[in-house]
Image: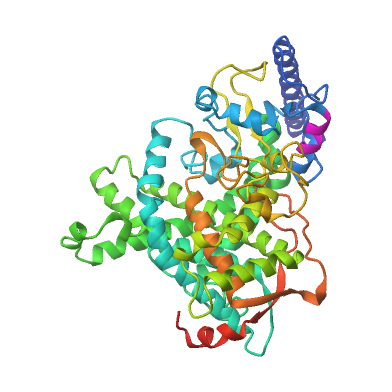
């Protein structure tokens, strides 16, 4: 090695060591200064650079944090690399965090590297800082894209249409009597198809081959989602490392995330470009006055807004919001429905009771519709109990305090990250009887869940940043699960218990996809084969 190259290598290594030492010294000094205030209890001395990250190596993360809370209390203080954080595992404390007094203070999001990559530079609805941009995006989502009127129209068209298509595919597969089906893929395709119609006004193109039951767009989107979700949120501890270690990109996390985001963005911008091209090819002069906003695709609504205010409704604004709708709507809804079917297969009595309710209230002369849902209380209880046991986001998306505040008598400095462990709250034995048991009856009006409006749970978050797609998700789950129960007899493969192991990711997936046996009800077989509804 040449002397100059050797000296250069030595100096580079020396600078790296000095940087690490300086960061460590600064970190310890800041921790000592903050230690003078009364912080919530925690697991003891934090290590330089990594803090308490070494305690979070066990997976799933929400289970690990629940274990720490058992030892240290429902308000837990942690140092996650370069960030101070508190973990809430009490419903009472969660409500206090999102009260009118503290809700605004905790309305910001921490700036993770992964969030910057996936949210178009922190401009997406889920990652944007609380302020005018976020309020504008939230207003569009709630008033124009996810309004009660639009959800009703989606129930009549997209949700009902995709549900019919799915049960008929399953019936064709079971033409010989019984079919062995992987529900995860079918439910993801349904959720994706609903949003494709609602967001882009289009149905996916189905390809040939082993994935013929899944459209080409859904197949590509699913591949990207399956790889990108484990790299997001608290599941990606890389986000919490000090800058020098993140720059090294240990494990290639940043590089891989960039590749996946580019593939996802190509899909989203393709949808926007296709809708823009369609609008150019058609004469909208007469139609724009006649069509209600709810009758147009979501992208169409935003492109119309773009024409009146191009500075606000840029293509990046549209792509960021569309990405949030797809990401939040497909994965979470399909995962929850898969958990629900898994629970029912492991609890045959609950499945039988649900089937009897659907048969009595709907019958077999037609497919279940949105008008039937208010008359199926046990089905609603099943959905609520599934959301209690397996909330799609076991850790709510992290919040961050914008100013110093006090919570439960403890001081929380500005910039503190707030983690709410919905999974642990939903299984709190001080709130729920037999919290680990699947008992839909608890959501009867007189049950310990205090009905569906008892505010005993938070599967969709709380406060200003509560999920705006809640009503759409509940409507989709009700129609799909009710129709699956109405049309088929379901049973476990070889009689074995369904594996309920949880995957470790931001979204609460099943580690082992659900495979089940379905047999069309004799009373529904003719309808499913004929295509009538």
In magenta, the rendered stretch is 65-71
Vertical placement of residue 184 versus 39, above or below: below
Where does the C terminus fall, quadrant-wise?
bottom left
Magenta stretch prevailing secondary structure:
helix
Based on the displayed image, in which of its 4 quarters is residue 412 positioned? top right
The answer to whether residue 69 is magenta is yes
How far across and down, in percent of the image, does residue 277 sit?
Answer: 30, 63
Instruction: List the single residue furthest toward the bottom.
Output: 176
Residue at 46 percent across and 64 percent down: it is 370
Based on the displayed image, in which of its 4 quarters is residue 21 positioned? top right
How many marks overall? 0
Residue at 53 percent across and 77 percent down: it is 207
Based on the displayed image, in which of its 4 quarters is residue 411 positioned? top right
Looking at the image, can residue 189 be seen? Answer: no
The answer to whether residue 381 is magenta is no
Vertical placement of residue 500 versus 144, above or below: below
Where does the N terminus fall, quadrant-wise?
top right
Q: Nearer the viewer, residue 276 or 138?
A: 138
How far across and down, in percent of the image, does residue 417 sit?
Answer: 63, 28
How far across and down, in percent of the image, does residue 215 sit?
Answer: 52, 72
Instruction: List the single residue furthest toward the left.
Output: 286
Left or right? Give the position of 71 relative to 462. Answer: right
């Amino acid at each position: 090695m040449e002397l100059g190259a050797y000296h250069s290598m030595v100096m580079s290594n020396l600078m790296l060591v000095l940087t690490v030492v300086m960061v460590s010294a600064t970190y310890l000094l800041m921790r000592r200064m903050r230690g003078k205030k009364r912080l919530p209890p925690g697991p003891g001395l934090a290590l330089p650079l990594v803090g308490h990250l070494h305690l979070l190596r066990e997976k799933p993360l929400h289970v690990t944090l629940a274990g720490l809370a058992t030892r240290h209390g429902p308000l837990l203080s942690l140092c996650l690399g370069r960030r101070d954080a508190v973990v809430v595992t009490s419903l009472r404390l969660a409500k206090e965090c999102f009260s009118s007094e503290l809700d605004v203070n905790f309305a910001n999001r921490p700036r993770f590297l992964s969030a910057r990559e996936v949210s178009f530079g922190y401009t997406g609805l889920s990652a944007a800082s609380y302020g005018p941009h976020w309020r504008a995006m939230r207003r569009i989502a709630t008033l124009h894209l996810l309004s009660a009127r639009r959800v009703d129209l989606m129930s009549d068209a997209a949700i009902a249409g995709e549900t019919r298509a799915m049960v008929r595919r399953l019936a064709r597969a079971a033409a010989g009597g019984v079919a062995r089906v992987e529900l995860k893929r079918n439910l993801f395709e349904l959720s994706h198809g609903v949003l494709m119609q609602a967001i882009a006004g289009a149905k996916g193109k189905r390809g040939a081959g082993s994935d013929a039951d899944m459209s080409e767009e859904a197949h590509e989107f699913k591949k990207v989602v399956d790889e990108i979700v484990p790299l997001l949120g608290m599941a990606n501890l890389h986000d919490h490392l000090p800058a020098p270690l993140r720059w090294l990109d240990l494990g290639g996390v940043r590089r891989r995330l960039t590749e996946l985001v580019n593939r996802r963005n190509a899909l989203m911008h393709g949808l926007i470009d296709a809708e823009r091209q369609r609008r150019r090819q058609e004469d909208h002069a007469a139609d724009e006055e006649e069509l209600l906003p709810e009758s147009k695709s979501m992208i169409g609504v935003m492109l119309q807004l773009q024409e009146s205010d191009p500075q606000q409704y840029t293509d990046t604004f549209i792509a960021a919001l569309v990405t949030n709708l797809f990401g939040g709507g497909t994965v979470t809804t399909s995962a929850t429905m898969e958990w629900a079917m898994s629970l029912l297969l492991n609890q045959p009595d609950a499945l039988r009771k649900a089937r009897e309710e659907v048969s009595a209230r709907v019958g077999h002369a037609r497919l279940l519709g949105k008008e039937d849902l208010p008359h199926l209380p046990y089905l609603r209880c099943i959905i609520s109990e599934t959301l209690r046991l397996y909330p799609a986001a076991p850790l709510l998306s992290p919040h961050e305090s914008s100013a110093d505040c006090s919570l439960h008598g403890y001081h929380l400095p500005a910039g503190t990250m707030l983690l709410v462990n919905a999974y642990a709250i939903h299984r709190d034995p001080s709130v729920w009887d037999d919290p680990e048991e699947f008992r839909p009856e608890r959501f009867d009006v007189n049950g310990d869940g205090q009905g569906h409006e008892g505010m005993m749970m938070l599967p969709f978050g709380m406060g200003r940043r509560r999920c705006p797609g809640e009503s759409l998700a509940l409507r989709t789950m009700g129609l799909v699960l009710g129709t699956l129960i109405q049309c088929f007899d379901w049973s476990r493969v070889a009689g074995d218990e369904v594996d309920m192991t949880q995957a470790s990711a931001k979204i609460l997936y099943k580690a082992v996809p659900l495979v089940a046996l379905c047999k069309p009800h004799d009373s529904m077989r003719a309808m499913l084969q004929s295509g009538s509804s």
